[in-house]
Amino acid sequence: MAIFDLLQHYVEYITSPTVLLTILLLVGPILYTVRFERSIAARTITPSGVPGCRRLGLNGRSNLSDQHDHRSTSNGGGPHVKALFTYPIKSCRGVELAAAEVESTGLKYDRLLTFAQLVSKPGKGREKDSSAVIEPSEEWQHQWRFITMRENPKLALVRTELWVPDSRGCAMNINDQGDKDLQVPATKPRARSRTRGSTLIGQLEKGSKVSIRPISEDWAAQGGCLIVRFPFEPDFNPLGLRTEEVTIKLPLTATPERAEAKEFTTENLSIWKDNPQALNITNEIDKLALDKLRYFLGVSNPLALFRVNSQQQRAVTRCLPTDRPKENFKVGFADAFPVNILGLASVRATDAQLPPGADVKGKLDARRFRANIYVSGIEAFGEDTWKKITVGRRIGRDKDGLYECDAEYHVACRTARCKLPNVDPDTGIKDRNEPYTTLGKTRKVDKGAYPHPCLGMQTIPLFERGIVRVGDFIQVLESGEHCYEKMFA
């Protein structure tokens, strides 16, 4: 009883107005000083950027800032490009562009990299012996498997910055809004013409350490730099004062010398049903930063970073254009198709169909659907019937030199949706229901994709290199019905 009385008196003492005022007077100035110093630092320290490079992307207001205004998504003026996004690391935050270079595999830098975790499972047991007993195997099978926001929603908070070699003065620039990496041939545009067409796993098994030799960082010589940032918060973080921003710098196209010095390896990477050979560039990341990232994402297995191997890209095998039976279409780390298109009116219509109590009602962000090209000027779900379109310009070469013409895209199929759009791109928090539940009730419109709902369209560029800009008009060349072909039978 005496102990209870003592505790009661202690609680009354520390909660008395006099004691609380004393604590406030002592701690208050300290907290104010810390926050003031941080504020001053944020205002006065200007990022130096990347020497020899310039940042690629929009500065300031997003082209999606008015996405919830019905006037910005109405069908006035016809279909046109409202916003452009490329996603350098799969499932991480994208980079918004005013103009983008397009390759046959998609927007340049899109899904160039992906994080992966090492998954292990017991090897197959030996054959049954005469006693019909299967002996367990002592061997384990290891496989790098890509990760996404589906299972690790905090990937949404991993921000990316693209820094490309500064080529000012070398050629005319087509972008007056901050994207300086794109060059237009100085030839006169002409009318549209026909279209032409030893591993890290082994080191982990042996228990050996991965050595990293120092190397100079001439980022322009490495094809540019990708800066990756994420907030790290330790378990004990009173008042959030120990939260830090972790920064990682990665080469966009490492030279052979850097790849050798960093000991890159080529390993199998599991992406859905494919197992392409990809470049393991994990040694580019400081071990402490990698540990913090793994903790931040909630990944318990070994974590690695892979880059697309241009010689081992995955084949697009479904919903191909019937008039090009001999062409081979490829994709990098995107789920299945090179370029995703989505009408903003379709997102607004989905928002309107959400139940009144949904947290995202009235503010469903189109970024949740991670499209490359967001379209305005069409009715809701108007893109569903597109079969072939032109948007932007194709850059080609013939005996007379470089030329431009309309860039054609095969609209392969609708986009079958999973629960990934339930992740809020600003908070990394995954809603248990919306918008997937509503999509499941309203957008099971493709019998081939059933039971998955669909929103947006998957497309394949029918050219090797081109350019697309915000504001470009979209011409629909062919329309018709779609029937989705599933990845898994």
Image: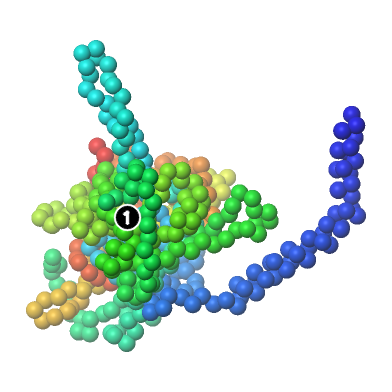
Q: Residue at x 32, y 71 (%)?
A: 222
Instruction: Tell me the crowding category of disc 1: few under 14, some 14 to 19, or many 20 or more residues within 10 angstroms, Cα based.
Output: many
* Colouring of the image: rainbow
* SS at badge 1: strand
Residue 85 placement (x, y as % from top left): 38, 64
Q: Is any atom of residue 148 visible in this view?
A: no
Viewer-proximal residue, 45 or 58? Answer: 45
Q: Which residue is mark 1?
A: 280
Classify the position of the N terminus by image quarter. top right
Q: Residue furthest bottom?
A: 169
In-image side of 398 versus 171 (left or right): left
Residue 373 against residue 187 in the figure, above or below: above
In the rendered image, the quadrant that contains the C terminus is top left
- Residue 254: x and y, percent? 30, 67
Query: Residue 160: x percent and y percent?
Result: 43, 64
Report the front residue among 229 and 107.
229
Decide if residue 268 is on the left or right side of residue 19: left
Identify which residue is drawn at 61% across, 75% down. 43
Residue 270, horizontal then vertical, whole percent: 30, 46
Q: How many marks?
A: 1
Residue at 43% x, 49% y: name it: 149
Name the residue nearer the viewer: 256 or 111: 256
Q: Which quadrant of the view contains residue 107?
A: bottom left
Image-quadrant location for residue 463: bottom left
**Horizontal side of residue 154 vs 477, given as left or right:** right
Out of 403 and 290, give the one closest to the viewer: 290
Image position of 60 with respect to 299: above or below: below
The residue drawn where x is 19% and y is 56% is 329
Badge 1 amino acid: Asn
Tell me if residue 266 can be seen.
yes
Outermost residue toward the top in this view: 131
Q: Is residue 26 left or right of residue 317?
A: right
